[in-house]
Image (cartoon, rainbow, N blue to C red):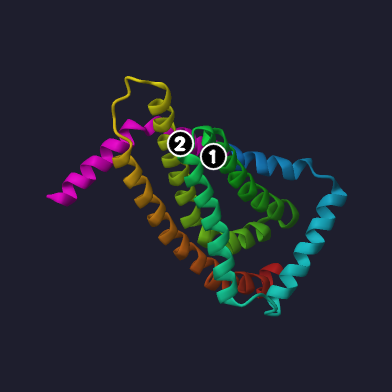
Amino acid sequence: MKKRLYQSNAASYFREYSSIFLFIVVLFLMGVIFGAIVVNSMSFTQKENLFYYLSQFFGQVSNGEVADNSDIFVQSFLHNSKFIGLMWVLGISIIGLPIILILLFLKGMVVGFTVGFLVSQMGWKGFGLAVASIMPQNLVIIPIFILMSAFSVIFSMRMIKKQFMKKYAQPILPFFKGYVVALVAALVFISVASGLEAYVSPWLMKTMISSSMLK
């Protein structure tokens, strides 16, 4: 009974704010597209210099000269947790709404630039390398970032209504409790993504680089 009630409340919540979730997804995709466009706007020299450093990194991965898996896990978890935590904090501030949207756009831009650069320099081989290096963790991270961005925007809007609309009678505390739960759940999933980045992505990258496809 409780499970059905929870599912009903969740479905009602997503229906109520469907326009916000759609806007967040579209904004992220716009960031991805913009990141890919930035690659095309780079000069030949800039691309060559960046690809040189990237090739050096690929060589280190192929030779096993990369950071320890546990170090990668910690660095990934801290980086993504700070990003999520910043969004969460911005959500409880009245002025944080536009910054949340900017951060999400930048996240999409980074993904688009990474994939776009590898594809522009290496074609299908670059696409395969992008899939091996960034897809495993981003299959978890991107949905979490999108959901957390939406939750932060929604909570920020509630704070604005509470502050400036006297007729807004809905109490903030119940929503704040849910907001805290969302943060904890996001951190759990971030740890899963960090595990993928630390233990799965390096192996996939080494396999791809060592294969005849990238030789």
Q: Give the amino acid type for the residue marked by disc 2 in the picture.
A: Val
Given residues 20 and 160, the one toward you in this image is: 160
Q: Residues within 10 Å of mark 2 (few under 14, many from 20)?
A: many
Q: Secondary structure at mark 2?
A: helix
Q: Is residue 78 in view?
A: yes
Q: Would you place residue 168 above or below residue 15 in this image?
A: above
Question: Is residue 21 magenta-colored?
Answer: yes
In this orientation, which residue lies closer to the viewer: 171 or 69? 171
- Predominant SS of the magenta segment: helix
- Residue 158 coordinates in the image, percent (x, y): 39, 31
How far apart are the alpha carbons under marks 2 and 1?
7 Å
Numbered range of the magenta stretch: 1-29
The answer to whether the residues at label 2 and label 1 have Cβ atoms under 8 Å apart is yes
Q: Residue 139 in the image: x percent, y percent?
A: 48, 56
Locate residue 74, reporting x and y percent.
Answer: 55, 69
Residue topped by disc 1: 100
Crowding around mark 1 (Cα neighbors within 10 Å: few <14, some 14 to 19, many 20+) is many
Q: Earlier in the sequence, mark 2 or mark 1?
A: 1
Which label is found at residue 134?
none
Q: Position of residue 52 (x, y in %)?
A: 82, 62
Answer yes or no: is residue 201 visible.
no
- Which residue is label 2 attached to? 153
